[in-house]
Image (cartoon, rainbow, N blue to C red):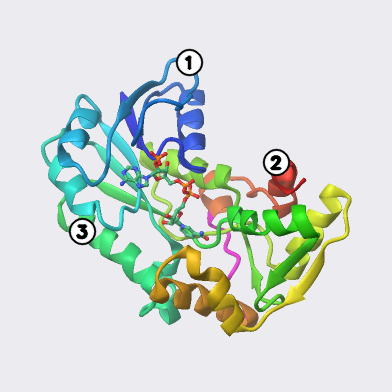
Amino acid sequence: MTTLVIGARGSIGRYVVEQLLAAGDSARASVRRLGSAEFPAGVSVVEADLLKTDTLEVALHGVRRVFLYAPAEGAHCFVEAASRADLERVVVMSSGSVLLPYAAGNAIAREHRAVEQTISASGLPWLPVRPLVLANNALHWADSIRSEGVVRLVHPEGRTAPIHERDIAAVAVAALHGAPADAILTGPELLSQREQVEIIASAIGRRVHVEEITESRARQRFGSMGDRETVEAILQFMRESTHGGSPATDTVQRFLGRQPAAFADWVADHTADFT
Ligand SMILES: NC(=O)c1ccc[n+]([C@@H]2O[C@H](COP(=O)([O-])OP(=O)(O)OC[C@H]3O[C@@H](n4cnc5c(N)ncnc54)[C@H](OP(=O)(O)O)[C@@H]3O)[C@@H](O)[C@H]2O)c1
């Protein structure tokens, strides 16, 4: 049975492909542009864009399962193409923010909820995967760590439980096999942003200075991460994380029967990004 992985070059998608193969499944990787895409032997590669229904129809041909990123604009195209395919299961990489009451009005939660609702309303057999804070967010610190040995943080004492992309993929693959894990996914331990920086500094053997910045300075710095509403949503998550708004859950342990990777494990896998 073939699984189509849409966004197979993404940080989570690439592990989904790898873990499907490890489980003995057949994987088809979709990318928006062929060319430099490199995948393990045995993976077929197809060009598809969530904004172009015709490309999705080709990619979905003969497929029974799909993993996809919550496509803010492409959900309707996906539903249109998928309704003509013979799908047993669609696993949507969404966000734990959809389950946080305080985030109900924020743009990030709203977007992910809208995608979930579109897919749910279509009648497709689907399951969400809902990580809360990706450990990968720390890659935003890599440039200034490399060039200046500094990280500029708003709310440095805000605590989150970042999750390794490999663990999100493992839950997604379990969901593709029919095990629903729709509760909030996190890493194992709450760490302040400052503590996360210290773990990175220790792994690279270098002092890294934390410079606290105000929300208004952060607004300017986060401008590249999205529109004004998205930046406000990110700031809201950070503010809430200073008083328990970003929990650590046992979802990975419950669904996979093992602890998720610690933040230090994620750092060990990404040391090269910070040096
Ligand atoms: N940051 C957080 O803390 C957080 C928390 C919860 C959930 N999330 C979710 O995690 C996602 C990011 O995951 P990630 O780090 O794995 O992302 P990523 O590495 O940027 O990968 C995103 C993938 O989506 C594909 N893609 C984007 N637009 C597409 C389109 N129109 N058609 C087909 N494919 C498309 C890209 O394909 P190409 O390779 O072809 O470009 C890429 O492979 C966010 O979008 C958010 O929904 C994030």
Badge 1 crowding class, 10 Å Cα cut-off, few under 14, some 14 to 19, many 20 or more, is few
Query: Magenta-highlighted stretch: main secondary structure?
Result: loop
Quarter of the image with the C terminus is top right
Q: Which residue corresponds to mark 2?
A: 269
Q: Residue at x 69, y 62 (%)?
A: 189
Which of the two discs, 3 and 2, sits closer to the camera? 2
| Vertical placement of residue 200 versus 110, above or below | above
Mark pair 2, 1: CA separation: 23 Å
Give the x, y percent position of residue 119: 22, 54
Q: Dot 3 lies on which element?
A: helix
Residue 188, label in figure: none
Q: Which residue corresponds to mark 3?
A: 118
Closer-to-camera residue (188/92): 92
Mark pair 1, 3: CA separation: 35 Å
Q: Dot 1 lies on which element?
A: loop
Badge 3 crowding class, 10 Å Cα cut-off, few under 14, some 14 to 19, many 20 or more, is some
Q: Which residues are magenta?
A: 244-251
The amino acid marked with disc number 1 is Ala
Q: Which residue corresponds to mark 1?
A: 41
Is any atom of residue 246 visible in this view?
no
Disc 2 or 1, which lies upstream in sequence? 1
Closer-to-camera residue (18/170): 18
Q: Dot 2 lies on which element?
A: helix
The amino acid marked with disc number 2 is Asp
